[in-house]
Image (cartoon, helix red, strand yellow):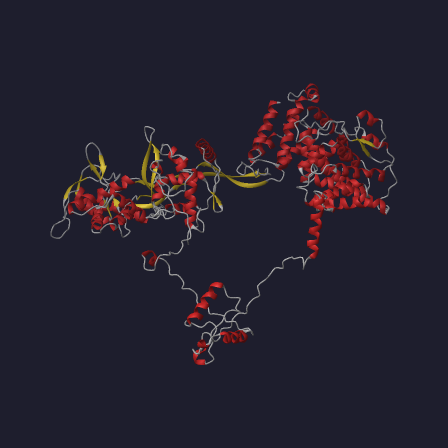
Amino acid sequence: MASQPPVHTIDRTPEYEEFISKLAEFHRQRGTPFEPLPKLGNNHVDLLKLFNYIVEHGGYDAVSDEKLAWRRMCEELGLMTSNPPAAAFSLKTIFYKYLAAYEIKTIHHKEPPPPEILEHTTAKGSGLLTRTLENFAPNRRDGSVAHKDSDGDDGTPVRERPSEDTPGSARASRGLRQDPPQRVIFQPDTGPARATRNASGQHATPGGAHGSGHPTPTHSGSHHLSQPYSSHLSAYQRTGDGPSHQYIPKEVDYQHSSILPYKPTPSHTLPFRVVETPANRPEVFAEARRAARLHMTGRPPANPARHLTGMEGGPNIYMRCREALLSGIPSEQAYALNHLVKISYERGDRYRFEQFPKLLEGLVEKALEVGHLFYDVNWTIIYAEPEEAASGSIGELNGFTGTHDILTRIQQLKTKPVIDGVVSAEFSDQLNLITEAVLTIRNMVIHPDNATYASNYPMVLDLLCVLLRLPVLDMTVELKHFALDIAEQITPHLILGADDPLYQALLSQLDQHSDDRGIALTALRAIGRISMELAETNKLDNVPVGVLQKVKDWLLLNDDELMDACLDFLYQYTAVVRNLENLIQATHLEGLVSHLVRLLSHGAKREPREFTKVPEQRIAGNTMIADIPPDLCEQLLAIEEPERCYKWVRCFFEEDPEGQVTQIAIWQAYNKAFQERLRSAGRPMMQAAEFIRSITHVYQNAVAKIKREQGPNGAVVDKYAIDGIRPRKFPMSPGGVEYFPCLWSIQTQPMTVKCLTWLASPEQMWEHILTQHLGVNPDPEDKMFKRVTGEYTCTWAACQKYPVPTKMDLFVFAAHVKLHMIQAYGTYYNQPKKPSRQVIPAKTISFSGETTAVAPRDPNNPNAPITAGGIPLSATLVLRNIARNVVKTDGHEELVKTEGETKGWNERLFRALRPRLYEVMADNRLLAPHIVSLLQTIDDA
């Protein structure tokens, strides 16, 4: 199966960001444009990967000098498109414009050519390191000799035009054959006027023309023929020779079989356009003459639409709805509100209050009409100073500063006797319009801009107070829900004190409507989000005791949304010290803390985990190139180059994706193996460059590279290496048989070394030890060893059987040596073959732990670490607030004095719960930092 091409992606690592910033600064100083994310086809190019990859292959000049190298770079970087030449040239252009000068400056430590001969020219050719203003001459299209670069993908792919040279020229012979000109059969005019034209032509023809026996063709009536064709046809008529264009002989012998089935296409009538003249369009010319007379008298022509400048198409639907709403006409308001509900729902993301002045005021005024439906009052908005507004009637609301006593006014109102489900049609229609007005406001404040805009209008806060204090009826539930939704969106932009009417109205919803989950949930969210977008702290003063008790009870319900809203409320409430005094008096604090600790494992799941003690380590491969065995050397010498090189590489090297061999080491090993023998035989050696290229032909993944490394003195030096291969631990014969080294120790001065002669079989090894190390030679006649007695010492590997010279029979000692051969070769041949890449597996510890809810990922930073979230995190934060602030209350000091507890409330609340806190800290990895902070706060307090 063919391997899948790599996918090119951009890794936004700190190294990448630093490289892009340096590159941008370089282009800014150079005065050249820079695109950090250039595009090739449908992919954005990672400039860091491209720069490192080209530099690894020798740089821009080296890659450009190699045939089709840029096309190969496209494939290896995963940037290949359906048009390989275009993709290669595009990649080369990207490197040329954005990275070439940077490579010259940072890698070669030279001054790059000026932009006039680098970035401002096309990416044609190479030689950037030697390019100057004096030796650079741009290519011209009109030159007699076209520039030909060595890279097959160097130029922009263009469609080649066919050569216009003569067929006998060399260029024409190399080009593709062109289609011959198409023979179009003449289409004669077969209309009914043919006989008349021919007859008239015959009467007009002189008598000499009739004597030829051929009728004279005429073309005066053939208006569909083009002028060149007509002139060409008349030439045939004058000369009397050439093919006939209209004559079809009646005899079958004179008709061709290919023409008989032909049916000419009928002629088409040419379209024409009627020209306006005073005869066919008198009214147009009369109007023009009248306008000319008015112009001469100085009077402009009548234009009924001159007063509608800018309104040619009339107002759009948004303007019409706003004006209809402000008109006060019930039918117009019904039309406007019906459309505004749809617009605010469907186009709420683009519909802004600030684009349509008076729209919010109109909606609020319409919604305030709810007053006369349930009370004997007509709410009106006035714009006056607070003193003047206070002296007004009970139904006047101050549009400047808001009405601070609006709740008192509502309590003073007399409620009308309205019965659910028993209302008039007029009442129902009015309530429906009011509901649509409130729903429009609710839909629009979902957008943050509209919420900020509405929070700056005090009349909106008064409207919410009016809606939340409506009588407890089924028909008012929907209005109250809409009002709470509006409050939830605008309270983050408000600062509400303890005496603010809206704050008190929201608290009353928690106290009076605790049986309605929707009202309780939305009211908690609205209160918890007060001042969220502002720097002011939401202190939550004067919360009734009944509300605190209900919040504690709601935490016991199996309702995640309600539980989350209660924890958000408690987190802000417990952040203020004086609020904890009320919490201690209103609730059983020990029970609340115990339940919060239980919530630390809310929704927890036990999952297996693995902890890595020691990471995986790769065993370094063999780096020494083995000496060539004598018999293998003889086999390879009998082969000519380059096949000898191919077989030698296969015998002594193997593929390894992470392996590397220096070019000088492999070349020296090859010379050591064959140079002396070839020189003595008068045979030539392979050149170094050809030898390196041959290695890359043997193994597909072997690549010759030039790597830049820092030398001992700090200077950057070039390292010539071959990646993708490594020396074999044991040489292998061309037939696949691996050699084993002789481990017999040889005494040399000043140390003992191993023989390490490579032999392919135990028999060869045994004979080698007897002849080379023991000095025993076989009989020349029968090639057998004679039975002799002598002193022998075994120095094979770590053998301790005969460490000192021992007198014995040769055959006995030879049998002992055979045991070493059997053991060595038997273990070697029977053991499983190890892979080329050997690693020490990582040491891990497996255990199970708790996993709770996590915070949603930031779309702007998808690689950020995962953090804790949800109900367990909120419970931890509430516990930390309690531990930090409960010791600052007056109740803490009284507890220390009266009961003698040294650590006061923290000791009472958390002493019995510490084991559970330690257990959660050990099991929940994401929640552990927050539990540590909680325990630290308990100890410090």
Total number of numbered discs in the rendering: 0
Q: Position of residue 602 (x, y in %)?
A: 63, 38
Above or below, 662 relative to 580: below
> Which quadrant: the C terminus?
top right
Q: Nearer the viewer, residue 370 or 621?
A: 370
Between 86 and 507, the one nearer to me in the picture: 86
Image spot of residue 9 (x, y percent): 47, 43
Residue drawn at x 45%, y 49% as measured from the top left:
81
Can residue 254 be seen?
yes
Identify the residue shown where x is 64% and y is 30%: 879
Give the x, y percent position of residue 615. Answer: 43, 37
Q: Is residue 82 left or right of residue 933?
A: left
x and y percentages locating residue 663 in the rendered image: 29, 40
Quarter in which the N terminus is drawn: bottom left
Quadrant in which residue 258 is drawn:
bottom left
Q: Is residue 641 above or below residue 410?
A: below
Left/right of residue 179 with respect to residue 409 in the rendered view: left
Q: Is residue 493 above or below residue 255?
A: above
Q: Mark yes or no: residue 50 visible.
A: no
Q: Residue at x 69, y 34 (%)?
A: 452
Residue with the most extreme left position: 781
Closer-to-camera residue (778/172):
172
Query: Can you tell which quarter of the image residue 461 is in?
Result: top right
Q: Residue furthest top?
A: 897
The answer to which of 372 and 299 lies nearer the viewer is 299
Question: Residue 408's quadrant in the figure?
Answer: top right
